[in-house]
Image (cartoon, grey):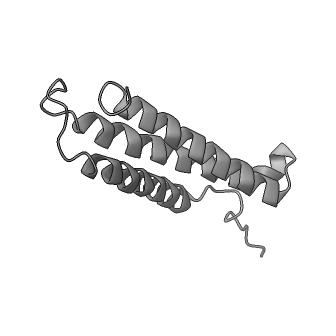
Amino acid sequence: MTQLNNATSQPHPISLVKRMLVGGCIGLLLISFFLLSAREPNPDWEKFWMIRPLIIVPLAGAMGGLCNYYIIRFHDRMGLNKIIAMILSVMVFIVGLWMGIVLGLDGTMWN
């Protein structure tokens, strides 16, 4: 009898979730640092102005973690060297996180 090994063909959802959680936590920590540095907010800003960046930036970090997962996991199918794939995934994560920070702070701290 031969046993079939399906471990290589099935995706690893735990690794995906872990990367998305780490990316979201990095985004949350980074935006919390920026928001806590604003001691006296501008009176022209809305009352709950901190909610928008606290939602958007961790979501951008989680999407960066998703991109990181797929670039690292499928680098051989894309024809990339593993080191180049890691550098590319980190750059994609940083750019996505930066875009999330700009979108989250637009209209308040980013004027």
Count of marks placed on residues: 0
What residue lies at 76% left-to-right and 52% top-to-bottom?
85
* Quadrant of the rendered image containing residue 26: bottom left
* Image location (x, y in percent) of residue 92: 64, 43
Q: Nearer the viewer, residue 91 or 77?
A: 91
- Which one is in front, 75 or 8? 75
Decide: is 12 above or below 102. Answer: below
**4 with respect to 16 (left or right):** right
Q: Nearer the viewer, residue 58 or 31?
A: 31
Image quadrant holding the C terminus, namely top left
Residue at point 80% right, 59% down? 82
Residue 58 in the image: state x and y as whole percent: 39, 46
Q: How far from the left and from the top, in percent, is residue 108?
A: 29, 29
Image coords of residue 80 (percent x, y): 85, 50
Q: Is residue 52 above or below residue 111?
A: below
Q: 9 or 108: nearer the eye?
A: 108
At horizontal 51% and vertical 40% (from top left) the residue drawn is 98
- What quarter of the picture does the N terminus occupy? bottom right
Left or right: residue 7 versus residue 41 is right
- In the picture, residue 6 is in which quadrant? bottom right
Residue at the spot x=58%, y=59% of the render?
12
